[in-house]
């Protein structure tokens, strides 16, 4: 499932192609797959007025008609094409948006959610989500209060979108390693200083993820060039400390990276660098 930085990049891409133009035009909006057909027909011929992301939720605003709420889930994907006649097979496209001449287009396939919602329904989604490190209105103290009141592990809490929105398996594993925190530490045992450091690190790392379109979490002194080690080879790209490195040696201490199942997701950590 894409992590929060990917959704914020998508919001920017939609805005750049369809709203941040000298003369925004009415758009061609269809649902070739037909699962969004009624709403697409309502939106067809209207302008995309704004875009927004909160955690793993994307919102495309078509004032005054409402918002297209998108959650990619495990299989959703958005592709952007700049030339007419290219892109995904029509029968797989849930939502197609293009300029009248087709010079810019976006196809959404396989999302968990793609619905047209009202302002009130959109606000209800924001209300149930935790603070997003990539949003300027994020309140880290709101997450702090929930964490400090919980006996649940910090690893599980960081993945709970009601606590912190946008953090996925990679950022969860990596930020805990970077601060030497055992992933099984109860939330109530996390100090204010630890939480402040975790939050600021998430802000910095996720903004870099938006900028680079990949997740890099190793510090400059631990890059392959600095350490004289081979670069990571993985479909996810980016240099990491522990994520998907089970049974491999830790870059810092040489201990074997461990993995375990936690809340139906794979957890990765170094037992030496992240002692209880």
Image (cartoon, rainbow, N blue to C red):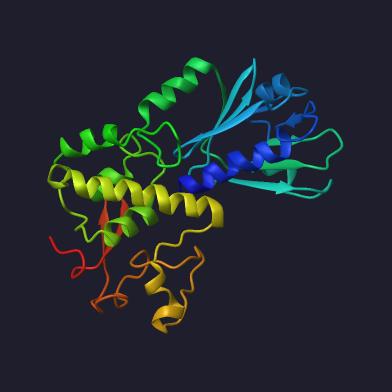
- Picture residue at 27% right of the left edge, 34% below the top: 141
The answer to whether residue 29 is left or right of residue 5 is right
Q: Is residue 263 above or below residue 95?
A: below
Q: Is residue 157 above or below residue 266?
A: above
- Picture residue at 42% right of the left edge, 84% below the top: 228
Residue 4 visible in the shown view: yes
Task: Locate residue 264, reporting x and y percent.
Answer: 31, 50
Q: Quadrant of residue 178?
A: bottom left
- Picture residue at 22% right of the left edge, 61% below the top: 180
- Picture residue at 39% right of the left edge, 81% below the top: 227
Task: Locate residue 172, reporting x and y percent.
Answer: 33, 53
The answer to whether residue 126 is left or right of residue 237 is left
Residue 94 visible in the shown view: no
The answer to whether residue 256 is left or right of residue 229 is left
Q: Is residue 24 above or below residue 210?
A: above
The answer to whether residue 160 is left or right of residue 103 is left
Give the mark count. 0
Task: Locate residue 123, reporting x and y percent.
Answer: 45, 21
In the picture as drawn, the residue positioned furthest to the right comes out as 101
In the picture as drawn, the residue positioned furthest to the bottom comes out as 228
Task: Locate residue 239, reporting x and y percent.
Answer: 44, 68
Q: Nearer the viewer, residue 44 or 90?
A: 44
Q: Nearer the viewer, residue 113 or 147?
A: 147
Q: Quadrant of the C terminus?
A: bottom left
Q: Is residue 26 above or below residue 90?
A: above
């Amino acid at each position: 499932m894409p992590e929060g930085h990917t959704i914020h990049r998508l919001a920017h891409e939609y805005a750049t192609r369809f709203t941040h133009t000298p003369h925004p035009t009415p758009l061609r909006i269809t649902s070739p797959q037909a699962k969004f057909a009624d709403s697409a027909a309502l939106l067809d011929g209207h302008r995309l007025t704004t875009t927004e992301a909160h955690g793993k939720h994307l919102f495309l605003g078509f004032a005054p008609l409402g918002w297209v709420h998108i959650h990619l889930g495990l299989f959703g994907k958005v592709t952007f094409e700049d030339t007419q006649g290219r892109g995904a097979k029509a029968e797989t496209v849930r939502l197609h948006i293009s300029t009248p001449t087709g010079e810019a287009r976006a196809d959404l396939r396989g999302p968990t959610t793609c619905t047209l919602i009202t302002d009130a329904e959109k606000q209800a989604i924001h209300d149930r989500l935790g603070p997003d490190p990539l949003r300027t209105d994020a309140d880290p103290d709101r997450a702090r209060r929930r964490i400090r009141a919980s006996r649940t592990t910090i690893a599980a809490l960081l993945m709970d979108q009601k606590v912190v929105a946008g953090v996925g398996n990679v950022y969860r594993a990596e930020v805990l390693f970077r601060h030497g925190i055992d992933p099984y530490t109860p939330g109530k045992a996390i100090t204010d200083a630890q939480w402040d450091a975790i939050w600021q690190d998430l802000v910095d790392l996720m903004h870099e993820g938006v900028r680079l379109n990949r997740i890099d979490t190793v510090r400059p002194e631990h890059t392959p060039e600095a350490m004289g080690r081979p670069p990571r080879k993985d479909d996810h790209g980016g240099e990491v400390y522990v994520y998907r490195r089970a049974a491999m040696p830790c870059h810092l201490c040489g201990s074997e990276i461990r993995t375990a199942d936690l809340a139906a997701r794979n957890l990765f950590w170094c037992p030496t660098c992240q002692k209880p």
